[in-house]
Amino acid sequence: MSSLVDAVREVGPVWSHTCSFDELFLPYTVPDEAVGRLGGDPDSLRTWTAVWKAGKADVVVPVRDLANAPASASVPVRRFSWRTGQRHRPGLEFLVSTGRQHGFESLAERRLLLALDFAGGVAEVLSQPFRLRFAQVDGTDSHTPDFLALTPGAAWLLDVRPAGRVEKEDEVRFAAAARAAAAAAQRCARRDWRGLVGVRPTSPSPPCRTWPR
């Protein structure tokens, strides 16, 4: 892997009064090797599931029916924890767009929430929305995306990592999340589902775009 940041659009300055959310992140391209580990058989998606949590109950939804999942009634599938000595920085961020607080597990995730709120047009943001269970060449695996952001025209399934902290197993999980979003898009006429990984460089420099400070 030669670079963590690929396909960065170099189109000049980003104007704050007209920018959209997809102009406020550094997209990460998942390597073909990671995609290949999921296999090429479309029927393999039949075994993939998304586990949501509604109250104290788990709701298991086939990935192909992801667009019909109980998103509005769900809560994060895992709890946010705060303790002394931990390396990451979890917390709560209030979004004007939704009128409530949303959990994050790192400063990079907090910047993503700020970017969503700054760009506007967000109807709902779900932290740790579901646990994706999927098959790969080595067996089964699971992944919990960082956020699901709902807008009138699109559902953004989002992961965010600082540059230099994307491991091989992360790449396979990101590829699985993207495939799950693509499967949901085929079944949903109301929203275009999109799977994205945003990377914030540890030492940003122009012309790279970063999360708003």
Image: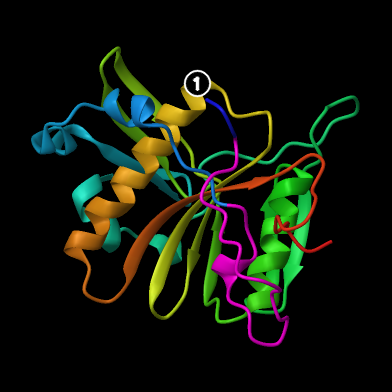
Task: Determine the image quadrant of residue 188.
Answer: bottom left
Q: Which residue is mark 1?
A: 168
Q: Is residue 58 above or below residue 92?
A: above
Percent coordinates x, y for residue 120 in the rendering = 62, 80
Task: Determine the image quadrant of residue 137.
Answer: top left
Magenta region: 4-26
Q: Nearer the viewer, residue 65 or 208?
A: 208
209 left or right of 37 in image: right
Q: Quadrant of the C terminus?
A: bottom right
Which residue appears farthest toward the bottom when viewing the image? 17
Identify the residue at image location x=83%, y=28%. 87
| Magenta-span inclusion, residue 114 | no
Percent coordinates x, y for residue 29 in the rendering = 47, 42
> Would you say residue 119 is visible in this rendering?
yes
Identify the residue at image location x=30%, y=46%. 180
Which residue appears farthest toward the top when viewing the image? 138
Identify the residue at image location x=50%, y=42%. 77
Q: Is residue 97 above or below residue 103?
A: below
Crowding at mark 1 (Cα within 10 Å: few <14, some 14-19, many 20+): few
Q: Nearer the viewer, residue 6 or 157?
A: 6
What's under tag 1, amino acid-wise?
Answer: Lys
| Magenta-span inclusion, residue 22 | yes
Report the predominant secondary structure element of the magenta stretch. Answer: loop
Number of marks in the rendered image: 1
